[in-house]
Amino acid sequence: MAYVVGVLVVVVVLLASIALHEVGHLVPAKRFGVRVSQYMVGFGPTLWSRTRGETEYGLKAVPLGGYVRLVGMYPTAAAVGDPPTRSAWGRLAAEAREASADEIRPGEDHRAFYRLSTPKKLVVMLGGPVMNLLIAAVLLAVVYVGIGVPAASTTVATVSSCVLPADAAADAACTDDDPVAPAAAAGVRPGDTVVAYDGQDVTSWDQLSGLIQASGGEADVPLVVERDGRRVTLAVTPVVAERTLVADDGSTRTAQVGYLGVGPTQVTERVGVGAVPGLVGERTWGTVSVVATLPASVVDLVRVTVTGEERDATSVVGPVGIGRFAGEIASADGAGVDDGLKVASLLDLMASLNIALFVFNLVPLPPLDGGHVAAALWEGARRQVARVRGLPRPRPFDTARLVPLAYSVFVVLGGVGLLLAWADLVNPVRLG
């Protein structure tokens, strides 16, 4: 049941994110006088709709996107100089112009989207992605400022009795053949708070882990701990052992590193509101890196899907994979897994999804918002060059010529979406 609840949470938040994304387009368009004939969440057959004023608001059957129909999206044929229609691409562009012109009511050409100035076009087209970024910022604030996230403190929770192989089971017991763990041999106890290691003050568990890993094989390394209100100095000799290391991007590798045999106490940490912009920026930059390597990731996904190899944690996932993540988070059970952690993890997942929507929609290809942004910038640049050179104001940029490209991009994205759905079903990425 918890698994289903997690999936439903994703569906509801995804629909809300899509709806608010379209609101980000709708509100400025109406503010600038553009007639908006439709506001729809989803694609395909209409499940429900109501007309308020001059706009039809509705919900469609396939909740994988949405749109607002802005009247006069493409300049009319007369506005762009009646371009030729001899080629197949030219005919597609002409059909798009004609369909767009048919939506313009008599006497309302001034309300067509293509009549807007470049700054206003940018506000309308960027309104959707920016809305997703704002949603992500709010969700991250709730998680990191309100709920808090689990973090490893510098207080020791567990001390291993022996050094087990890296691939040993979690519940494996020590045998007489296993060497004593360095921490146990040095007298480290659960509840000790590490203050310094090898002469360096310790402020985080990650820092301590790095120091331990780098000091493998060194004898009598000074370790200062706080125990029962007083400081105790111990001498530890980390052994060199093969261990599984987890990178920032979630990928894993094995390496020979220093090993002490201690585990941290998990605590809940909160941050101040001032840290949220940095969190949003960090997540956004990471998502930009993922989107930039998306073609290579898709090629690799095809390879592992065909060969049947197991997908790693860095593999790209689609809506089905995100739903599986939410189900696994909601149904997780074990020590330290409480409802607060589940809620925080689900909200964090939804924040990441909204950042992905923000970044992906800014890719400068039609029919994505970034394609319209690029077209508006190009039109604005042409006007500025003409103004500086004292030339007549150029005609509007013929965005209808991009329609064939938009169709091609749509087909490619649809194919990638189907591939992701299939891979997420038959060879899913798992959280743990």
Image: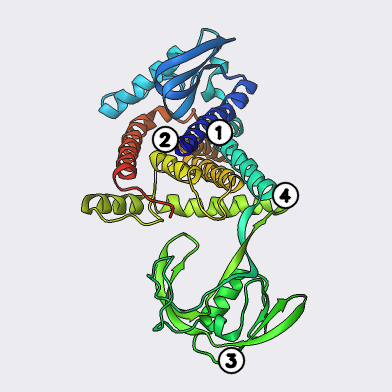
Residue identified by numbered label 1: 128
Q: Do residues under tags 3 and 4 come within 8 Å of each other at their CB atoms? A: no
Q: Do residues under tags 3 and 1 come within 8 Å of each other at their CB atoms? A: no
Residue identified by numbered label 3: 220
Count neighbours of disc 1 (C-alpha within 10 A) and say few if under 14, some if 14 to 19, many if 20 or more: many
Tag nearer the camera, 3 or 2: 3
Q: Estimate the spatial distance between the alpha carbons at disc 1 and disc 4, rounded to whole Å.
A: 24 Å
275 and 269: which is toward the camera? 269
Q: Is residue 175 left or right of residue 219?
A: left
Tell me the SS state at disc 3: loop
Amino acid at pointer 3: Asp
Count neighbours of disc 3 (C-alpha within 10 A) and say few if under 14, some if 14 to 19, many if 20 or more: few
266 and 381: which is toward the camera? 266
Q: Is residue 111 above or below residue 228?
A: above
- Looking at the rendering, in which quadrant would you find the C terminus? bottom left
Nearer the N terminus, badge 3 or badge 2? 3
Q: Estimate the spatial distance between the alpha carbons at disc 3 and disc 1, rounded to whole Å.
A: 59 Å
Task: Place residue 26 in its image quadrant.
Answer: top right
Residue identified by numbered label 4: 273
Task: Give the number of the disc on residue 366.
Answer: 2
Task: Give the number of the disc on residue 88.
Answer: none
Q: Residue at x 50, y 62 (%)?
A: 248
Q: Estimate the spatial distance between the alpha carbons at disc 1 and disc 2, rounded to whole Å.
A: 15 Å
